[in-house]
Amino acid sequence: MLTLCRRRRSSRQKNARRILEERNVSLPDADISFLFQRDGCRTLRMTVRADGSVRVKAPALIPWEDVLAFVRSRLDWVREKRAFFAEHRGVTAPAREGSAALYLGRTFTLRPVPALRNARAHFRGKTLELPCLRPGLDGEARDRAVERAFLSWRLDAASLILSRRLSRLDQHARERLGDHAAAHSLTVRSLKRRWGSCSVQGDITLAAQLVEMPLPLIDYVICHELCHLRAMNHGPAFHALLRMLLPDAEEREKRIRIWGLEHPRT
């Protein structure tokens, strides 16, 4: 039996590796700066974040000259990544009266209405009406009321949609993969970094923001976590399982990455 939990606050995870050295480095001749860290990693690696910032992580004993050579060898790759992020970068918009809201890939306009007894948020045409207005509310208080009502609606809508999709896809995965692995519980809450996670006990957590996406992308995230019930890493076995559930998994993964850039989370 699948247990549904809902959380309105997120918790931070501690960094598993201890940082041995950290400093900001600038290469004026290459027009690049980056955050350099030494930790317990085994390989030298570089990442470019959505805001264009660059991070380089290195093993404890690798010479600094090798780090610089590595960075310079990947300058074209950094420029390509930055150009890609700049092309798809969206802007975070607060939930306010008249602002846009997404539901299953469709855009609606937020409209606050009086908070009558037993009133619930509902769609009216291309408008999402939020019963949150009380006498005396104006200015910032009105904005906060709209934001609270929107986040409450989003959590409720996500809990309903995601629990239904998980139940359906959980059964499909068992039939398609021929095993008895099943999700134990579902927690829906706002997540800032991940779209979802799965514990070894079968407890799945999904981001409430997923309800804003088209269903094919929601299904990708859920199938991704269901595959972690069978493979707790991202190795070849995991990807083979994912392709069995979603033959176009690679394409959906690319779409969800672009979606995340174009629609920053709130």
Image: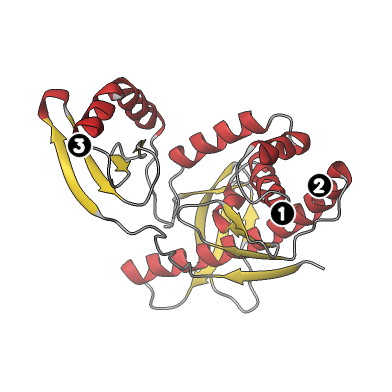
Residue 61, position in %: x, y?
A: 27, 44
The amino acid pointed to by label 3 is Trp
Of circles 3 and 2, the one toward us is: 3
Which residue is more in the foreground, 19 or 82? 19
Q: Is residue 132 visible?
A: yes
Helix, strand or loop at mark 3: helix
Q: Which residue is mark 1?
A: 229
Disc 3 versus disc 2: distance between alpha carbons? 48 Å
Q: Quadrant of residue 200?
A: bottom right
Q: Residue at x 58, y 48 (%)?
A: 212
Name the side, left or right, on which 70 lies relative to 32. right
Name the side, left or right, on which 45 lies relative to 227. left
Of circles 1 and 2, the one toward us is: 1
Which residue is more in the foreground, 119 or 59? 59
Of the residues under marks 3 and 1, which one precedes in the sequence? 3
Q: Which residue is mark 2?
A: 173
Disc 3 versus disc 1: distance between alpha carbons? 41 Å
Q: How is the image coloured?
A: secondary structure
Q: Is 84 placed above or below 54 here?
A: above
Residue 8, position in %: x, y?
A: 52, 70
Is there a contact, CB below 8 Å, between mark 1 and mark 2? Answer: yes
The amino acid pointed to by label 2 is Ala
What residue occupies the far front of the structure in this picture?
Answer: 61
Residue 66, position in %: x, y?
A: 24, 31
Could you tell me which quadrant the C terminus lies in?
A: bottom left
Q: Which residue is mark 3?
A: 64
